[in-house]
Each structure stands twice: as C-alpha cells, then as structure tokens.
Amino acid sequence: MRFRLFPLIIFLLLFIGCEEKTDIPRTSVNISVDYPSDLDGLSVQHETVKFKNVSSGMETEYSNSKQLSLPEGLYDCSYEANITYLKNGETVEGKLRGYQASLKVLGTNVKVALDTYLLEDKNDFIIEEIFFTGTLQPSGKQYYGDQYVKIYNNTDHVLYADGVSFMESKFVTVTKYDYTPDIMKEAMTVHAVYTIPGNGTEHPVQPGESLIICDTGIDHRVANPNSFDLSRADFEWYDESTVPAHMDIDSPTVPNLDKYYCYTLSFWLLHNRGFRAFALARIPEKKEDFLKNYLYTYKYVMVLPAGTFPMEQTAYKVPNEWIIDAVNTSVQASYVWNVTDPSLDSGWTHCGTIDGDKTRYFKSVRRKLLYITRDGRKVLKDTNNSSDDFNTECVPSLIEEQHTATDANGTPAVNVTYDGVTLKTE
C-alpha cells in the first residue's frame, strides 16, 4: 500500500510546486489618506480598507492603511474610519468614508491617494425602489410606460415631499470620459429634473411610508395584461411632446410632477438597462433661476475606430449639497464607474447580468430591510453605498402586492416581501 501511495505523493508535491510558480505577482500598496480639513481635533479610532477585485469579485479587507499587499489586478478601493472630532467645542463621534473605483494594482509598488468625507445623515427621503426595466407583452415585445420609483420616509418623523426633485444623470455608468471641467466633487450632472409640487406642507409622508412617482399613472393591464395598475400612484412625469408620432399620456387620476427640464423632445423614459444614476434633491432655487444659473458646458474626447473626435455638450448641474439621496445603476458586466461623487454613493446596483439581458424585465432594485420597529415601521439600510444597500433583480413591490405577472407568460407573483428578499408575515 505504501508503494502505491508514493507516486501519488510525488505528483501532489510537483503539482503544489507548479501552483506556487504560477501565483499571480503581488504588489505593495501604499495608501495616503486625505482627511477633511474642516474637522478640528480629528482622531482616528479604527479604520478599515477594503479592496474588491473587479474581475473576480474577491474582497480583501485590512484593519489599517499601511503595509498592504495585493495580487495584481483591477480593484475598487473603499475606506472607512470611526473618528472623534471637535464640534462647537465638544468631542463628538463620526464616520469617514473614501472610495476609488477601477484602481490598477500592477508592478512592485502602487501609491493610492484617497480623499475622505464625513458621512452625514441627511435625515430626509431615500430612494426605496427603482423599476426601470419595464414589462413584456404576451408576444414578448417590450412594453413602455409602467416604470416607477418609490420614495421612502426612513426617519421617525413626518417629512414633506413638497419640492423634492427626482433626477437622472446625464453621464452613463458604462462609458467613462475625462470631462472638463470636472465638477463631480461639487455637483451631479443631470439631463432630467422633475419636482413634486406644493407649498411646503401639502404632501406629508408619515414615518415608514412611501410615495410613488411613475411614468404613466394608468391601469396598464388594459393595454398589457402582463403589467399592473398605476392609476393610484402619487405623481407621474408627463411631457408635452413636440413629436406627433410619440405623444405622452396624461393620466386623469394622477397629478403631474413639475417638469424643470428634460433633454427629450417627446417623452422621458428611465434608462431601461440602468446605465445611469438617479437621485433625489431639494433645489432651493426657483425653476427659472435654476435653469439660468446652473447650466454646465463640458468637453471631452471621443475615441472611435474611425478617429478621435473632440466633443462639447451641455447639461445641468445640481450641487451635491442639495442632493439627499443618489443611486448608481448599471449592468453587471458593463459597469465602469460611478457618475456621482462617492459622498453621495460609493457603490452601484443592477438589473441584468449582460447588456441586453432579456431576463431583466419584470425586475427592480429594492433597498434592503434592516429591521422592523415594535410599532411595525420598517427601517431600511442607508449607508450611501448602493452595492451594500440594495437587493438586485427583485420582483417589483407593486407586482408582488397586486399579484400580477412576473414574466411574459403571465406567471403571477405569489409572495409579498419587505425588500424583494425578506418575506412579509401576516
């Protein structure tokens, strides 16, 4: 028996030796953390650095930012620290965050400079769910008009939705250009802004309650038996189209959002593959002043097989300080970068694995449930990191609640959940 095992042992030793020789080279990573200059008496109590390999999804975590070593590759790097600092003469606790996407770790040594920011609770609305993929008709043809967004009061007090704007980014998360001037640290570049009307106290939302804004507030089952009813949504975005062949529908039962601006000459649809970021903001300017003072002209170079083309375009910019929540969305295999500053969102979420993925229909992204209070109020996860905060490719909440179709064959939804994952219990 021992003689039979001996060749096997030799083979295993040779195999292990070969594996050691083919190990991926490692790189020393030196991180320089840039702390906010406006925090007096800052003291770091504990810090964590995470590297996520973009190709494999493998995560490596360190408890400090010094003497790090990683296999060569492309990484997303995130930093978090528990700190104390002085505020009005008193020592208070806080949390710092930093983020850098698509970091190339190659060669012997790599230096990484990480800007950090103080994580703040805006104590305002958050995006609970985005249904951008749409549904399919029984024929398999894509159906338009039933996209919606849920806006949630995650606080313990009443919030007023009057003046809250919903926006879509101009830039896309699947293609990166060096836009100049680069204003991402100061503002989000948008090409669609729709605002909830009101005098400030017309639209109260109780703690743990949502409101729904949608594309078209009608019962879509009339046109598509695989869709659902949006005739009781809170608001719809309506566009007065200048294209006769593409006219929008103005619901008689759902009031319109106040359209600040949209790039399209017909009617607006959310990007149905999720190539953009979406955000909520409270814009303190009147519409006319915003449109006059916040136009953004930028330049970039488009490189194509046919040649190199200098480009110049315009959009609108919304200062980051006005933004109360942001969510970057993409397609899993096509994601390149975030189009908002990391202080707004240091992650991203998705529906669909590849571009054109037909399994994305009837799916939404839904914010994760943290816990339920004694009085039955759900508290949702909000860390300004959509990778951690959202469940991906969920059955949309309205499809669950109405038990409508989950696919082109008309298979009805059976379960009702809090967040697309956690089952509701009666």
Image (tube, rainbow, N blue to C red):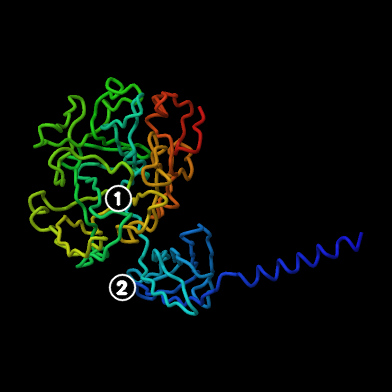
Residue at 19% x, 50% y is: 191
> 356 and 43: which one is in front?
356
Describe residue 39's horizontal placement relative to residue 66 as left or right: left
Farthest residue to the bottom: give it: 108
Residue at 90% x, 63% y is: 3
Tell me, for residue 38, which label it has, or none: 2
| Number of on-image labels | 2
Tell me, for residue 153, which label it has, or none: none
The amino acid pointed to by label 1 is Arg
Image quadrant where residue 35 sits: bottom left
Determine the CA span between mark 1 and mark 2: 32 Å
The amino acid pointed to by label 2 is Asp
Tell me, for residue 276, which label it has, or none: 1
Disc 2 secondary structure class = loop
Residue 345 position within the rendered picture, expressed as x and y whole percent measured from the top left: 35, 56
Farthest residue to the top: give it: 222
Residue at 17% x, 29% y is: 249
Image quadrant where one finds the N terminus = bottom right
> 21 and 66: which one is in front?
21
